[in-house]
Each structure stands twice: as C-alpha cells, then as structure tokens.
C-alpha cells in the first residue's frame, strides 16, 4: 500500500511544482511557530507540541512557475527521531532550527546534521540554518556564533522571530530559490529572482473566517 496521503497524490497529478521542505531541530525551538507565521501569518503563544509529523503548505510563484511548498513539521524530541527518519526521502530542502536562548539546542545542530548526512547526501539537499526567538533578551547564542556555524556547514544563516515575523519570509524564500535553481539548472536564473505569493489563499482564509453576524 502506498504511504502517500490523498493530498500528496493530488499534488502528483497537478501541474504545480511541489517542493518538499523539512524543519528539523530540538523540541521547543519554535519550528511550529515559524511555520504558522510563514504560512498563516499567525503567532500562537500556546500550542501543543508536535507529535510525530505534521505539515503545512504555501503556494508561490518563481519566474511565473507555480510552486507549492509542502513544509513538514517534525517532532524534535529524541524519542520521535526514528519516526521522522523516513521522511527524508524525496526531501528537496531542510531548515535546521535552534533557539538562540538555548545553548543546548545550538549544540544539537551537529547531531541533527549527522542524522541528515546518514539519510541524504549534501549534494542532493538544500539547507539553511535558523536561529529562532531573536526577539528575546535572554539569548545565549550570539549572532556571530550562528553565522560561524553556518559558514562551517557551508549554508546560509537567518535569525528569526515567530512573534514579530522577523526574517521568516526571507529564510523560506532563500531556500525556495535554492531548490528552484537546482531543479532548473538549464534556465538562465539571476541571483535576484523574484517571488510572488498566491493572493487567492489569503482571500480564501478571510472568507472562511468571516462570521454570519
């Protein structure tokens, strides 16, 4: 029996390009909050920890091509790591996330990179590093250390805040551009390719949220 969901099968049959993106990192670093801010432009102060795997999607256009980002939210707790290992298959990009107020989550990035290397090769995957919760005053990991870590991994670094939205669009857009370039090696793609979003999604959300009285 196929392990694909009904929505995944629908994606396969459409003309939309689907980019599968994973968010990886310790529990509590804010992966779900980052996704909610990017996809729904919402910040949920209180929400349940992700159990296993969940995903959200967002549609955009790169060079007039419709792209659907299917962003998988993985549980970061150690006991769930074996559950998440199978979803590396067919992933186009990975967002590594740590919490700038947690030294431990920063140190765990090397372990997460090791897991990535055991499941996919660096040549086959696009990666970025995010230091989340940069709005908080009690940070323990300075920006320079995040930048140094990213430099050593040969990937780009972004600092984000799910509360304010800082850096989140830029991070996802950079990863989407990297994936697009790798999937279209024969196209003449400038470094400053533009991204536009599907406005119909926002309109639909507003319509659904409208009450009768």
Image (cartoon, rainbow, N blue to C red):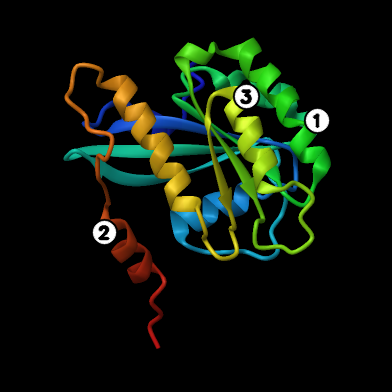
Callout 3: few (<14), some (14-19), or many (20+) C-alpha neighbours within 10 Å? Answer: few
Q: Which numbered tag is attached to residue 199?
A: 2
Question: Which of 166/150 is in front?
Answer: 150
Where residue 37 sits: x, y (%)?
Answer: 51, 57
Mark 1: secondary structure: helix
Q: How many marks?
A: 3
Q: Residue at x 71, y 62 (%)?
A: 136
Image-based side of 56 in relation to 146, left or right: left
Q: Which residue is mark 1?
A: 78
- Mark 2 and mark 3 residues within 8 Å of each other at the beta carbon: no
Q: Residues within 10 Å of mark 1 (few under 14, many from 20)?
A: few
**Local SS, label 2:** helix
**Where is residue 164, by image quadrant?**
bottom right
Residue to which mark 3 is pinned = 152
Alpha-carbon distance for marks 3 and 1? 25 Å
Q: Is residue 99 above or below residue 95?
A: below
Residue 97 visible at all: no
Of tags 3 and 1, the one toward the viewer is 3
Q: Secondary structure at mark 3?
A: helix
Who comes first in sequence, dot 3 or dot 1?
Answer: 1
Q: Is residue 21 left or right of residue 207?
A: right
Q: Is residue 63 above or below residue 208?
A: above
Q: From the top left corner, tell me how far across and down residue 212 is, in percent.
A: 38, 83
Within 10 angstroms of label 2, few (less than 14), some, or many (20 or more) residues? few
């Amino acid at each position: 029996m196929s392990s694909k969901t009904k929505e995944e099968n629908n994606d396969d049959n459409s003309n939309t390009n689907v980019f599968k993106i994973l968010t990886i990192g310790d529990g509590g670093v804010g992966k779900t909050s980052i996704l909610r801010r990017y996809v729904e432009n919402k910040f949920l102060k209180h929400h349940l920890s992700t159990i296993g795997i969940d995903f959200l999607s967002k549609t955009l256009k790169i060079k007039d091509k419709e792209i659907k980002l299917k962003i998988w939210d993985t549980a970061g707790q150690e006991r769930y790591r074996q559950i998440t290992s199978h979803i590396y298959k067919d992933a186009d990009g990975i967002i590594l996330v740590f919490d700038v107020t947690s030294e431990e989550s920063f140190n765990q990035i090397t372990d997460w990179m090791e897991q990535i290397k055991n499941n996919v090769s660096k040549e086959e995957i696009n990666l970025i590093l995010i230091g989340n919760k940069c709005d908080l005053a009690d940070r323990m990991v300075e920006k320079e250390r995040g930048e140094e870590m990213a430099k050593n991994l040969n990937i780009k670094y972004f600092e984000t805040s799910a509360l304010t939205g800082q850096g989140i669009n830029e991070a996802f857009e950079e990863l989407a551009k990297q994936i697009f370039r790798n999937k279209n090696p024969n196209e003449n793609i400038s470094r400053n390719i533009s991204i536009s979003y599907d406005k119909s999604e926002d309109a639909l959300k507003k319509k659904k949220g409208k009450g009768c009285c």
